[in-house]
């Protein structure tokens, strides 16, 4: 149970909604629901999801939400979850934004993630980032990036290295480190642990 809500996992993809888009699913929510954060991007209109809120957006906290993509975190050689260490050091705004992005993206097949919060780095001119992707966040005019890749399993996305974009505008150092971490994960799948969102109080 994540965020205090039960969710079903699907390895074959989302099932069709039993209701029409725009239908309230308040009755399906567990009683201890907390206010859901605003998703900082627009979801594709034709996204198939198991539940919608009153405004026709995917309700990220329905107990019947389908998980299509599993987020994983890079684990260093000493067993430390480096993504969680970074996450815990951020303020509430960054944490809420990242959590909202992941909650939305995990319900959408990887090939349909919107460019407003995700980008493949394969085609960057002169890129040192071949084989990497990035999650994109902007909080109070500060641009954050989390470098990662699709893997090691087909339905995984592993977060490798978070950074402030202004600290490494060309990504040279960041991509070099992220590629090293990616190689470690591919060589040893235990170096990518499933993301577990903090439990609500």
Image: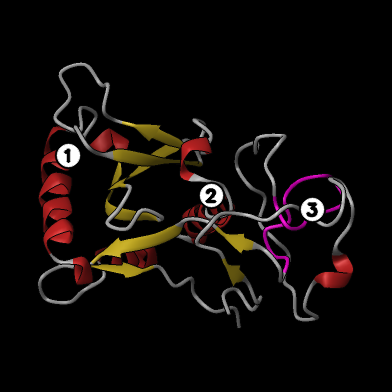
Q: CA distance from mark 3 to mark 1?
A: 37 Å
Q: Are marks 2 and 3 in contact (CB under 8 Å)?
A: no
Image colouring: secondary structure
Image quarter (top left, top right, bottom left or bottom right) of the N terminus: bottom right
Identify the element where label 2 is drawn.
Answer: helix
Earlier-in-chain disc, 2 versus 1:
2
Q: Main secondary structure of the magenta part?
A: loop
Crowd around label 1: few <14 · some 14–19 · many ≥20 (10 Å) = many
Q: Which residue does the numbered mark 2 point to in the structure image?
A: 105
Q: Which residue does the numbered mark 3 point to in the structure image?
A: 52
From the image, state whether disc 3 or disc 1 is nearer to you.
Answer: 3
| Extreme residue in the top direction | 125
Front residue of 92 and 70: 70
Q: From which residue to which does the magenta span run?
A: 49-62
The answer to which image quadrant residue 4 occupies is bottom right
Magenta span has 91? no
Q: Are marks 3 and 1 in contact (CB under 8 Å)?
A: no
Task: Judge left or right: residue 175 versus residue 146.
Answer: left
Magenta span has 56? yes
Q: Say if residue 178 shows up in the picture.
A: yes
Say above or below: 51 vs 56.
below
Q: Say if residue 90 shows up in the picture.
A: no
Earlier-in-chain disc, 3 versus 1:
3
């Amino acid at each position: 149970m994540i965020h205090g809500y039960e969710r079903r996992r699907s390895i074959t993809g989302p099932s069709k909604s039993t209701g029409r888009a725009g239908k309230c699913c308040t009755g399906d929510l567990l009683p201890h629901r907390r206010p859901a954060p605003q998703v900082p991007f627009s979801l594709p209109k034709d996204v198939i999801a198991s539940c919608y809120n009153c405004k026709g957006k995917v309700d990220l906290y329905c107990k019947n939400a389908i998980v299509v993509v599993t987020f994983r975190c890079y684990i260093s050689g000493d067993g430390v979850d480096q993504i969680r260490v970074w996450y815990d050091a951020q303020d509430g705004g960054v944490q809420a934004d990242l959590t909202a992005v992941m909650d939305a993206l995990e319900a959408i097949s990887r090939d349909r993630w919107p460019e407003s919060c995700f980008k493949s780095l394969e085609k960057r001119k002169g890129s040192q980032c071949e084989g990497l992707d990035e999650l994109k966040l902007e909080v109070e005019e500060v641009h954050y990036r989390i470098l990662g890749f699709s893997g090691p399993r087909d339905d995984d996305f592993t977060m490798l290295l978070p950074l402030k974009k202004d600290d490494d505008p060309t990504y040279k150092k960041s991509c070099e480190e992220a590629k090293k971490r990616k190689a470690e994960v591919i060589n040893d799948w235990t170096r990518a642990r499933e993301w577990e969102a903090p439990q609500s109080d």
